[in-house]
Image (cartoon, coloured by chain):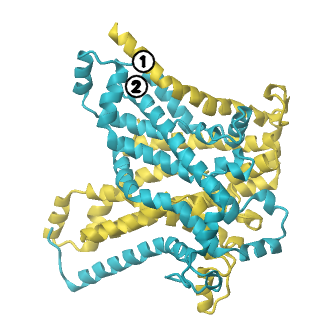
Chain colours: A cyan, B yellow
Amino acid sequence: MVRSQTLPSRMVDLLIVLVLTVSSLACLYPIWYTIMLSFSDQAAANAGRVWLWPVGFNLGSYQIILEDAQFFKSFGISLERVLLGGAIQFILTVMMAYPLSKEKDQFPGKMYYVWFLIFCMLFSGGLIPTYLTVTNLGLQNSIWALVLPGAVPIFNVILLMNFFRNLPKELSEAAVVDGAGPWYVMLRMYVPLSLPALATVTLFSVVGHWNSFFDGLIYMSKPEYYPLQTYIQQLVVRTDPQFMQNLTSEELIQMMKVSNKTLNSAKLVVAMIPLILLYPFLQRFFIHGLVLGSVKE
Amino acid sequence: MRHRSDILNYHLMLLPGVILLIIFSIVPILGNVIAFQRFVPGKDILKQQWVGLDNFIFMLQIPDSKQVFWNTIAIASMKMVLGILVPLVFSLLLHEVRVGWFKQTVQSLVYLPHFMSWVILSGILVMILSLDGIVNQILILFGLDPIMFLASNKWFRHIIVWSDVWKEFGFSTIVYLAALTGVNPALYEAAEMDGASRWGKLVHITLPGIVPTIVLMLTLSMGNILNAGFEQIINLYNPIVYETGDVIDTYVYRIGLVQMQYGLATAVGLLKSVVALILIAASYRLAYRYANYRIF
């Protein structure tokens, strides 16, 4: 394309680049600031002398975390739920998406299942009935309370179903002629052919499991069962209404004033690490996933 | 008979997922009957005392519910407008940039907050907005009085709305950038031949080209008018700002799971679910009709 190189136009270009640079740095600054705080001296942090770089660089906060047995336990529970929950969601997503990707003449009952899924996706039972269902099943304080209620990620099923639908039908037809059954076709042909799509939905699951805190808060009665996000929510953010209801406004303001900034920052940073490690993949596959969701016949 | 056994296998593949959905989605939906009961925890759900619409009537009488309803609408609609406007403007600016690496870098930076949980982002916000936090230090630097942002009814909604913009605007730009690449380049070339200005091209080619996408995002976001952002607000609010920041979902959580008024909380939640279902169904219908969008 021919670009006009007049002076006003170049000024506009410069202005745009400036606005974009400033806003993306501003977007990142709070996260950067937290990382820098976590490496700073506590006195410097409380005096507000930390802006861009650590002041009085030290790893004291991380040493305290290393000695915090509960932090590690919660980290472990989070890893466990990511692995277990991610695996279950993966298996169920594939097993539901494959038959639903068939045409109506190949699988006549298909539409009943599709409507069932739409209904479950649009209408939720709500907080209290879901809570009562999970507790009546005796799942409190068990990892299953974090994994089973969301075990079928309906949105992922739809994404993968649309992807499967666009795979060339000749492949599976050829396999069927050779005598392959539906399980074989699903596992040996559809799964290997959809690795990018599967990576996308799996990353959705992993991030979702790693980030959720609320189920841990309501289903776990003791801190030792908390996943990491719940643990951090209780210790760093701490807005438990039961706890706060008994405080006066002055006490609340006092509570907000007094905090261990450097240690809290370090905890937040450790909770961010897995996501930052996954970030390059997230970018690649999530964007791919969004495009994938829109592919339809 | 090959076909019949295939179909049987398809049903078998769907079975585990369907069973889990029945237990964890359908049973709770049926469990909403406790909205019509004076529910006492620990007693069988069928042996509870039935009270008809008492919970709903009570809900309409307490002043809290009116406030909670308006807070929800106020926060959700501000989020809806800014959630479309900010990413749109940002993508239009980004679209004007022709330097590839710069574009890519900006994009990679602004997606990041989207992947962080509200627990982490709230932890960060509480820190930078506290009395000795960085925002107040800047205020003091300019000779202004420090503000307790998270304990101020004047500021709380703005904090909620703008921090949501911060978290999501980058990720929302993906949709608009994708739409922008779909605008026919021949149109720009033709406009340049005719001597169109930069602004003229923006108004007459770029914007009309992505109107369908804007309309689609607008209709889809309408289904969220009762979702003010539970995970965000529960991590940022406190009793001082209930007046402006308490929303339906946080209210249901408090009266239900904290104060154990199961019947009342379920009634509020049920009403929300029904209205939300109607709104979502309507928005999908509109999106299908005007933007030819469908999820299946």
Closer mark to the observer between disc 1 and disc 2: 1
**Above or below — where is A180 with respect to B94?**
above
* Viewer-proximal residue among B95 and A200: A200
Query: What residue is shown with label 2?
Result: A99
Location of residue A135 by image quarter: top right
Quarter of the image with the N terminus of chain A in it: bottom left
Name the residue rendered at 32%, 24% in the picture: A185
Circles 1 and 2 in contact, beta carbons < 8 Å:
yes
The picture places residue A14, in percent across and down from the top left corner, at 30, 81
Query: What residue is shown with label 1?
Result: B9
Chain containing mark 2: A
Quarter of the image with the C terminus of chain A in it: top left
Chain containing mark 1: B
Task: Kindly tell me whether residue B124 is visible in this rendering.
Answer: no
* Viewer-proximal residue among B280 and A196: A196
Left or right: residue B239 versus residue A113 is: right
The picture places residue A283, in percent across and down from the top left corner, at 38, 57
Location of residue A63 by image quarter: bottom right
- Residue A203's disc is none
Residue type at tag 1: Asn
* Viewer-proximal residue among A261 and B166: A261
